[in-house]
Image (cartoon, rainbow, N blue to C red):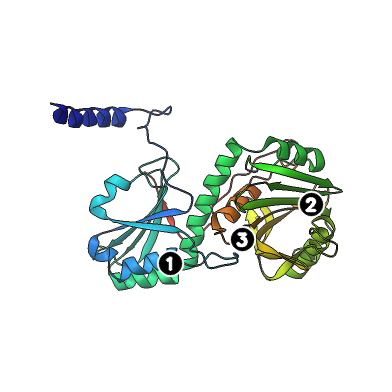
Amino acid sequence: MKNRIIPVLICVLCALFASCKDKNGGIYKPSCAGAPYDVLVVADAPVLSGVAGKAVIDVLHSEVIGVAQVEPSFTVSKVTSDRLNSTKFCRSIVMVNVSDIYTEPKMKYSRNVYARDQIVLTLQAPTQESLANFARDNERTIVDFLTRVELAREAKFLRERYNMHVDQTVEKMFGCHICLPVDFAKYKEAKDFFWAATDRKDDKDMYFVMYTYPYTDPNTFTKDYFIHKRDSVLKENVPGPKAGQYMKTAEYVRVYDSSLGDEYVFLARGLWNMQNYHMGGPFVSMSRVDVRNNRVIVVEGFVYAPEHDKRDMIRMMESALYTLSMPEYNQDGEQEVIEIELENIDIVEESI
């Protein structure tokens, strides 16, 4: 009798779940599942084990830019198409479709297909070989797209639950708002400079700095000037445990011209170390112009986690940087939260 009841209950629960409506009248969908930067690859068995599936997984396993050791961009799992139903709530899914109905390789994405805050990226091509080549040729686009989706998810979470002390201090000192993880517990204030850090017991700490300086001309946003300004500010404000020890930028640095909406953003990723002291790790930095106050505002996250992977930590800090709202951002003099916008890349969005 017991064995008969369980399947009946499951069917009833499924029917109730499918019939639930959300507040907008649509079918209710659960939140997506999994850890940040988990990606599920789905394909028919021959494709999954063939050159197309291998190429896609290799792309997703490409190295993270700007960390001290080799780490994959994503944590990848895979499943054949006929078993998707049991794993369809994953936060990021890559569908690999090979069929002669397609005339050329293409990508497209859909949101909230099976779950809320989910992204499904579809790669399609007429043959396995053409799909494999397409995936390799578009490696950076695929990786950057899925990374931006995850950064947006984490930024959304931080806006809902963030460190109030940091936000209040940043508002008092700079007239800005920012959402950092709640476990930041150590702070330092100086002239036009703020520092905050976690205080964990597992040697996996995150740090945040914010500083400003006068905006003089567009030549401010060059790699050489960025490093010069960063090193001068951090040398003065982030000393090591002994005299003559201070934080500095390591040789590896990449800079990018980017944007938030119509606003210019200068991004930098790289490595930092402590002068005359064995300590270092990755950092990510964002510089924006506060036009009303004629100054550059710099927010930066960096990580110290010796002998630990750093991908998720430094990306969490990058998400926090995107929550920065500038003072009197809009024309009405009201502060405005700028959501992360996906860059205009050559992918078509499907409506579901």
Q: Earlier in the sequence, mark 3 or mark 1?
A: 1
- Image quadrant in which the N terminus is located: top left
Q: Amino acid at mark 2?
A: Tyr
Q: Is residue 329 visible from the viewing direction of this image?
A: yes
Residue at image coords 38%, 47%: 90
Q: Report x, y in % for residue 131.
A: 34, 68
Tell me which corner region of the image, top left, top right, bottom left or bottom right, holds residue 253.
bottom right
Q: Which residue is mark 3?
A: 306
User: What is the distance, in whole Å, between disc 3 and disc 2 at their CAs?
Assistant: 26 Å
Q: Amino acid at mark 3?
A: Pro
Q: Amino acid at mark 1?
A: Val
Q: The residue tagged with tag 1: helix, strand or loop?
A: helix
Q: Report x, y in % for residue 151.
A: 55, 50
Q: Which residue is mark 1?
A: 59
Q: The residue tagged with tag 2: helix, strand or loop?
A: strand
Instruction: Give above or below for 123 relative to 88.
Output: below
Name the foreground residue: 256 vs 268: 268
Tell me which corner region of the image, top left, top right, bottom left or bottom right, holds residue 15.
top left
Report if the CB atoms under discs 3 and 2 are less than 8 Å apart. Answer: no
Residue at image coords 25%, 64%: 99
Name the foreground residue: 259 vs 177: 177
